[in-house]
Image: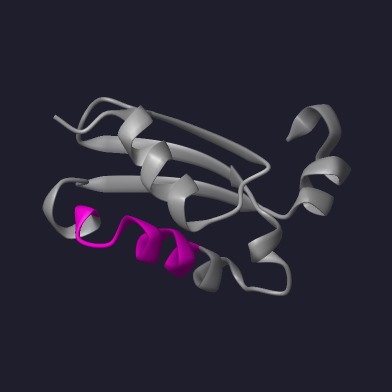
Amino acid sequence: MVTPESIEESIAAHLECVLLEVAGDGHHFEAHIVSPAFRNLSRIERHRLVYAALGERMREEVHALSMVTQTPEERAGAGAAG
């Protein structure tokens, strides 16, 4: 079974993350990812980076992944609401 920790490891191996939190039940996952790699990218481009980090796992193991993707600057500006 896929665990949130294994998803975190896959993402962290391919993206520099300032914050990386993943929760889920083994099939459906939610991720909050803060990375400088997201600077100047659209939301779709950011999600593609994460999907690329997960590679085949997205097709074979992970049934659903919802994401909040932010740059460190966006995270800092979000304050307590982020």
Where on the picture, by quarter, is residue 38?
bottom right
Where on the picture, by quarter, is residue 36?
bottom right
- Residue at the spot x=15%, y=46% of the render? 61
Residue 42 percent coordinates (x, y):
62, 73
In the picture as drawn, the residue positioned furthest to the front comes out as: 13
- Side (left or right) of 51 relative to 62: right
- Side (left or right) of 34 relative to 81: left
Q: Which residues are magenta?
A: 47-57
Looking at the image, how many numbered discs can be counted on the residues? 0
Image quadrant holding the C terminus, namely: top right
Q: Is residue 13 magenta?
A: no
Residue 40 percent coordinates (x, y):
72, 74
Residue 60 percent coordinates (x, y):
12, 53
- Residue at the spot x=51%, y=70% of the render? 44
Q: Is residue 49 magenta?
A: yes
- Side (left or right) of 30 relative to 1: right
- Residue at the spot x=53%, y=56% of the render? 15
Residue 20 or residue 78, whichever sits in front: 20
In the picture shown, does residue 41 fall above or below 78?
Answer: below
- Residue at the spot x=77%, y=31% of the render? 81
Q: Main secondary structure of the magenta part?
A: helix
Image quadrant holding the N terminus, namely: top left
Colour approach in the figure: one colour
Residue 43 percent coordinates (x, y):
57, 66
